Amino acid sequence: QKDQIRQGRLAGDRSGAILHFLASMEADRWIAEADLLVDMAHLLMLRRREIIGDAPARALMAALLDLYEQGLPEAAFDERFEDVHAGKEAYLIERVGEEYGGRLHMGRSRNDEVATCIRIRLRDELLGTMQDILHLRLVLLEVAARHTETIMPGFTHLQYAQPTTLAHHLLAYEQAFSRDFDRLRGAFERVDASPLGSAAFASTGFPIDREYTACLLGFPKLATNTMDAVSARDFALEAMSDASICMTTASRLCEELIVWSTAFARFIQLDDPYCSSSSIMPQKKNPDTAEIMRAKAGSVAGELVAALTIVKGLPMSYNRDLQELTPHLWRAVEATRQSLPLLAGMIESAAFNVERMYDEAGGGFSTATELADTLVREFDLPFRTAHRIVGRAVRHGSLDLATLEAAAVEAAGLSLVERGLTEERVGAILDARHGVGVRNAPGGPSPEATAAAVLERKLTYGAD
Ligand code: ARG
């Protein structure tokens, strides 16, 4: 087969290096199937508008249906053709002859063709990603539902801060992933518009029917302005940026899984299949899946930045630079879609060390806030005074009654014992379960609040 497009204006053979440099064949594998659908829609439209005769239309449709069933032959991906659109056209012409095969490209260009193909494939990938997120959210909700009573340390600055529940922690991620879901849903609407019929950028003088091809390809609307339609890639930037934000959420959760499975924390045991060992240290069980995922978030962010940078200097309308953007899009999509199901599996299969979490929950004086709050509530102290008393007691190394009393005298000139504070009361306040239990505001960590949140979030999940 010859490269049909170079037989007119251009002469001379090109070196393999030039061909390879210009070709988009690897990335085009992502859109090969969509390209056949675009061809069929375009052909039906040409026939409906009687732009093409019955005989060539039939011959072309038969060949296209055949290709759709069999898949494009490897020859269509030969770099000599630069891209799949040209490779497939050459193959069609070889198969049905130029008299028929040479008529398919009437009234269109590879510019509107590729933009339509990318949108078709991306729609599928966005829906798939949304499905992946939904599954992950369900796993988080189900594990959270089992752990509304599981008390664990809560952190700020990765220092023990206040006790919380495992349910609260997991629900925080479910909430974040639901925003990632919403963003992708918004992106989908802007991807879901048809550029077909824009041709090179100026549309065409053939009496085409853009609405018809859009409808055949399942697009509810047109990417109307034909100059914008062939040159816009903001739909891809938006999808990548949403994927990147979602991967950032995933990466944060991976980071937690890594920290929680350290020897210091020992809050969870990841299931063996998600871990690797060491070639030298026989005892090792490393959280490699979570680590690779954390890194993938960086890679996806990199793909986004590359794509933004490719587009930012481009004048209207189509520029070949756009070809260089598409592989970044697919790499971002692929990394995201690989990651999310594995993350769900990692959480679903993890063993949570409930006793260990509870033992640590009151550690590092992390029930001190509840103690200060109780001094305010029971002895009518200003919060700042109670904060200073408890802080001073911690400075002295203990929250027992004697240390608290000394701190109260020293830092506030008052006696807590005189006001009725007892050793027993202090002990009760400092119990982690007590502190979590009273944190009952909507969205809070208490067993009651998290149980309600699980139900409410399941409704949102169901609606999504
Ligand atoms: N492979 C090209 C791309 O991905 C298809 C469009 C080619 N258009 C052109 N004028 N060379 O953008």
Image (tube, helix red, strand yellow):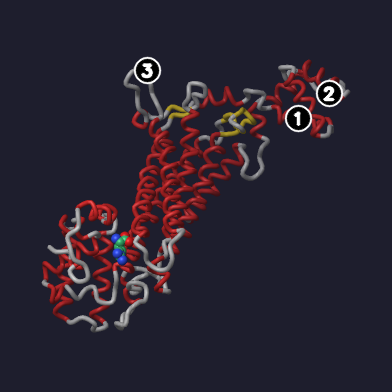
Disc 2 marks which residue? 411
Count of numbered tags: 3
Q: Ligand 1 sits in which quadrant?
A: bottom left
Viewer-nearest of discs 1 and 2: 2
Res 260 visible = yes
Q: Amino acid at mark 2?
A: Ala
Q: In which quadrant of the rendered view does residue 67 lie?
A: bottom left
What residue do we see at 41% from left, 70% from top?
223
Q: Residues within 10 Å of mark 3 (few under 14, many from 20)?
A: few
Residue 322 coordinates in the image, percent (x, y): 37, 60
Mark 2 and mark 3: Cα distance apart in space = 51 Å
Residue 277 located left or right of residue 433: left
Q: Amino acid at mark 3?
A: Gln
Q: Is residue 199 above or below residue 303?
A: below
Secondary element under disc 1, as helix, strand or loop, is helix
Q: Residues within 10 Å of mark 2 (few under 14, many from 20)?
A: some
Q: Quadrant of the N terminus?
A: bottom left
Q: Amino acid at mark 1?
A: Ala
Q: Earlier in the sequence, mark 2 or mark 3?
A: 3
Residue 383 coordinates in the image, percent (x, y): 80, 34
Viewer-nearest of discs 3 and 1: 3
Q: Residues within 10 Å of mark 1 (few under 14, many from 20)?
A: many
Secondary element under disc 2, as helix, strand or loop, is helix
What residue do we see at 52% from left, 24% from top?
265
Res 221 visible = no
Residue 252 coordinates in the image, percent (x, y): 50, 38
Determine whether label 2 and label 3 are within 8 Å by CB. no
Disc 1 marks which residue? 372
Per the rendering, the mark at residue 283 is 3
Secondary element under disc 3, as helix, strand or loop, is loop
What residue do we see at 24% from left, 64% from top?
85
